[in-house]
Amino acid sequence: MTTLLPVASGRRTVAELRTLLRPQRGRMAAALVLLVAGTVAGLVTPPLLGRIVDLASNGGGTGEIVLTGAGLVLGALGEAALAACGAALLAQGAESMLAALRERFVDSALRLPLEQVEKAGAGDLTSRVTNDVAAIAEAARSALPRFSRAVLTIVLTLGGMAALDWRFLIAALIAVPVQVRTVRWYARRAGPLYGSQRVAVADQQHHLLSTIEGASTIRAFRIADPHAARVGSKSQRAVDLLLAGVTLQTRFYARLHVAEFAGLAAVLGTGFFLVRGDAVSIGTATAAALYFHGLFSPINVALALVDDAQVAASGLNRLVGVAELGQDSAVSPAVPGSSPASSSPSPAPAATSVPVTSPVTSAAPSPSSPPAPASQPVTSGAPSPPAEPAPPPVMVSGSHAVLVRGLSFSYRSDRKVLSDIDLTVAPGERVAIVGSTGAGKTTLAKVIAGVHQPTTGTVSVPAGDVALVTQEVHVFAGPLAEDLRLARPAATDDEVRAALAAVEALAWVDQLPDGSATEVGAGGHTLTAAQAQQLAFARLILADPPVAILDEATAEAGSAGARLLERAAAAALAGRTAVIVAHRLTQAAAADRIVVLNAGRVVEVGNHRELTSRPGPYATLWEAWSDQRPDRD
């Protein structure tokens, strides 16, 4: 079941905006001063036009009219220059705030527990990165400067009308109740509607991406029509909400036009009676009418931008929701052997495909204390355990590298995947986890790595940092050497080459067009599956964590590729504690200890010789695997 990522409350979003605004206060203040000056320069136009009317009606001289016209030109030029500078400064400040928010969002997204991201689906996160960021960016570049200038124009224009005659201001304010009621009516409906639109688009993207990713399977099972219908249904839902928004906008503008006509009629009527009573001149009444007519555009802009503000606010709430969630997930490591505790986050390591995290203790959630994650792994690729006997363990201080007590885990509350697991891994020891498909091997590896939190029980890694390497390989776009330096940004060229040599990748890397500077990943040089997995092991060597978890790395490789990767894994695991989810039982045979899982429970523990010398699940697996094993393997 899809569980979307959270959305921040309005109060929390405002608090976040204040934090982002703090470094931009000087720039924003300068922008405000320039916008006010530009607006004042533009407001001289109606009085000057009114003076020309008075001069024309009273037989004024040509020189006076020309001089007044020159004032109009200077006012227009001053308004344009000042407004342009102010809008540019305002947009720069807003863009800087948006850039800071984007960085916070990416940092927080990388901190999120993978379990939570998987439950939300790809569509929710990608729609926030694309659609929501685009809406906020448009608001920062265009809507915010226009809105600021529109508000200033409205306020200063009303002040100008009061300066002409206070009764013009009273007449203009007749339109305000209609406008206020219209905005309140619109805001009550627009916020929830645009929020629903964002959710619908995220849901549509999630189903579309899932369908595209599984296209080959969908075609193989001839279920393309149901999937197309599901995507069509989600798309139609998004379109229906979009059309509902258009209808709402149409009704919104219709009500605004009523306010405009009422206000203009009131100002013209007031001018008629004041001129007839010789209270003001025709030119003054003309200036008042022009002032109010000049309000049409800024009022419409300000109120129309309420629509953009609703869209941007909806996207902003969604971005801040992820930023908050990432902060909550970035829990400081617990002291080895201590109980789970929540504390302030420490700085995140640089993005790396082989994760490095601090020693932690993880336990099942309790109402009184949120759990600290067992680690913050980032899957790096598809590694494979070694087939050769492991080198002598390098022991570190402490009696346990990994400690699992009373562990149970469920993806759904009505079905346990792991039940009552106790496991201790000594420093430097290599433990293989074996079992039939569905026994819970990968789930146990992910819980130890901190990808999933225990439902009950505790997982602690007193040895220190943990790296999880799976069979899902990702090669980052960019130079190959920089791909490896994601694991250790300060790694020298010699260290990078040494890591490549250790996993037997240096020879083919040197043969690439630009060696280790060759662009790989999306749009770059295409690597084979085995080559990509070798890079994953090279990252592991550079990251140098004391504990590594390998999950069925050679499941996708052929025999020759598997043997190469097993040698690479042996080099990468040298001197480390290792938990190996074994796809090939030769990997289990080479381990110090074997843990056999069945239906989520530990049913056997021992080394290869012990377990094959007596009847049991492992002996049965070994016999079946040996009978089917190709001679060449």
Image: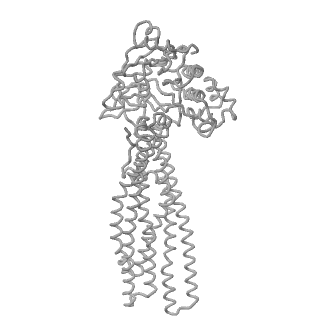
Any part of residue 469 in sight? no
Relative to 155, say whether 416 is above or below: above
Relative to 103, say whether 507 is above or below: above
**Residue under the point 39% across and 61% down:** 247
Which of the two residues, 585 or 93, is positioned nearer the viewer here? 585
x and y, in percent, of residue 254 in the image: 38, 69
Q: Colour mode?
A: one colour
Q: Is residue 575 left or right of residue 280?
A: right
Q: Quadrant of the N terminus?
A: top left
Kindly indicate the quadrant of the structure image that contains residue 285. Answer: bottom left
Any part of residue 44 in sight? yes
Label count reads: 0
Kindly indicate the quadrant of the structure image that contains residue 276. Answer: bottom left
Q: Is residue 170 left or right of residue 160?
A: left
x and y, in percent, of residue 192 in the image: 35, 54
x and y, in percent, of residue 588 in the image: 48, 16
Q: Quadrant of the C terminus?
A: top right
**Residue under the point 67% across and 26% down:** 507
**Residue under the point 42% across and 53% down:** 239
Which of the two residues, 122 or 629, is positioned nearer the viewer here? 629
**Residue under the point 57% across and 28% down:** 533
Relative to 225, say whether 252 is above or below: below
Kindly indicate the quadrant of the structure image that contains residue 313. Answer: bottom left
x and y, in percent, of residue 296 in the image: 44, 72
Residue at the top extreme, as displayed: 613
